[in-house]
Amino acid sequence: MSPIDSWDEVDGLFAVFTGAGTAWPVIFTIVAVLLFIGFLVRMIQHENHAYAQMINHEPVESGPAAEGEPPVF
């Protein structure tokens, strides 16, 4: 039997599934948020590096130029 008899007093924003008493949903959510933030930080670092290389007229990455990539001056 559920300990919740009525949903009348529960505010919609605060009704959260807790994972049946385990910490795994919380851990999963924290890890997912940290991975997303890490992805954004790494993407911004890469873009800043790429733009700096383009401004200095240097290749962004080593190796042959990709199709459609402007040549190095």
Image: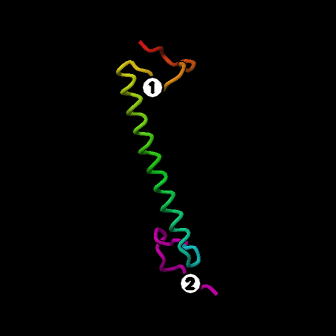
Count neighbours of disc 2 (C-alpha within 10 A) and say few if under 14, some if 14 to 19, many if 20 or more: few
Query: What secondary structure predominates along the stretch shown in magenta?
Result: loop
Instruction: Give the residue type at disc 2.
Output: Ile
Q: Quadrant of the C terminus?
A: top left
Count neighbours of disc 1 (C-alpha within 10 A) and say few if under 14, some if 14 to 19, many if 20 or more: some
The magenta stretch is 1-17
* Left or right: where 4 falls relative to 11: right
Gap between marks 2 and 1 measured at Cα: 58 Å
Q: Position of residue 27 (x, y in %)?
A: 51, 66
The residue at 46%/56% (across/down) is 34
Numbered mark located on residue 4 in the image? 2
Disc number lying in front (2 or 1) = 1
Asked whether residue 67 is drawn in magenta, I would say no
Q: Quadrant of the N terminus?
A: bottom right
Picture quarter containing residue 67?
top right
Q: Position of residue 44 (x, y in %)?
A: 41, 39
